[in-house]
Amino acid sequence: MTCKEIMEKLEERWNPSYALEWDNVGLLVGREDKEIKKVFTALDATEETIAQALEFGADLLITHHPMLFSPVQKVTSADFIGRRLITMIQADLCYYAMHTNFDVKGMAQLNQECLGLAECEVLEETAPGEGIGRVGVLDAPMDLKTFAEKVRNDFEIPDVRMYGDPAKSVCRVAVSSGSGKSMIRGAIAKGADVIVTGDVDYHSAIDAVAQGIAVIDAGHYGIEHIFIGQMAEELKERFPEMEICTEPIRHPFLMV
């Protein structure tokens, strides 16, 4: 099966039209007519990830985050992005990214299922009936500290950062994958008791608490690493004849 044929199948569900206007999704490196037999899934196209994909013998690398956002003015070995591009092109490795189109049509649903939320609605609509994040309710209220532990366990991550009174009762939950401090205002407007997201800075967090909403910062990677395994499962279901390999879950920082 060619790279183009795989793209067409994937885009039946995760159409690039769902991506936000600033995003850069789709085939970023490689030939559409490349024959694909092995696929490697990862969160980011780092040098380590590309090396792992090549060691596996992958013909196609699929990541959540695009490696390319800004225009590339030169491709040389003096630049880390240039080195990655050269490596992929020399190896004839196709590289496909599915970012905010997956956030809208995949990640939001995964997040709500991971936390066991019911009666869900879109947090921020970006297309008719679709959008970034979800707001839903827990089976029963619980205190914020217990909920923070639930988030840590549900996403299988080492720790989370909690802002708010540990004894605060929470039931209505907003969740937005990735870097979601811009979603706090919408979560407040929708009556959420707490928002689960990543990359929340100090001032945004304490200002949120002052407005009556608690914050659980589970980390950008912490919330989104579920893409890796989920995309692998999707590929196995859609393309059973292909060999699929995943990047090992490896948090990009250590707490010391």
Image (tube, rainbow, N blue to C red):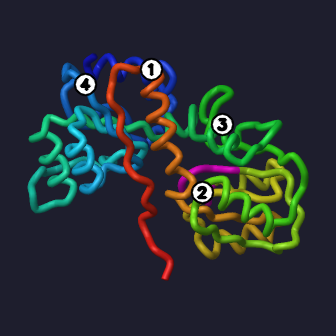
Label 3 crowd bin: few (<14), some (14–19), many (20+), radius 10 Å = some
Identify the residue shown where x is 63% and y is 50%: 176
Label 1 crowd bin: few (<14), some (14–19), many (20+), radius 10 Å = few
Real-space Cα separation, disc 2 to disc 3, in angstroms: 28 Å
Q: Nearer the viewer, mark 1 or mark 3?
A: 1
Which label was assigned to residue 36?
Answer: 4
Identify the residue shown where x is 60% and y is 30%: 127
Main SS of residues in magenta: strand
Label 4 crowd bin: few (<14), some (14–19), many (20+), radius 10 Å = many
Real-space Cα separation, disc 2 to disc 1, in angstroms: 26 Å
Identify the residue shown where x is 51% and y is 30%: 18
Identity, as a three-letter code, of the amino acid under mark 4: Ile
Task: Return the residue at label 1.
Answer: 238
Give the camera-side residue of 23 and 148: 148
Identify the residue shown where x is 25% and y is 24%: 36
Q: Which residues are magenta?
A: 175-182
Which label was assigned to residue 156?
Answer: 2
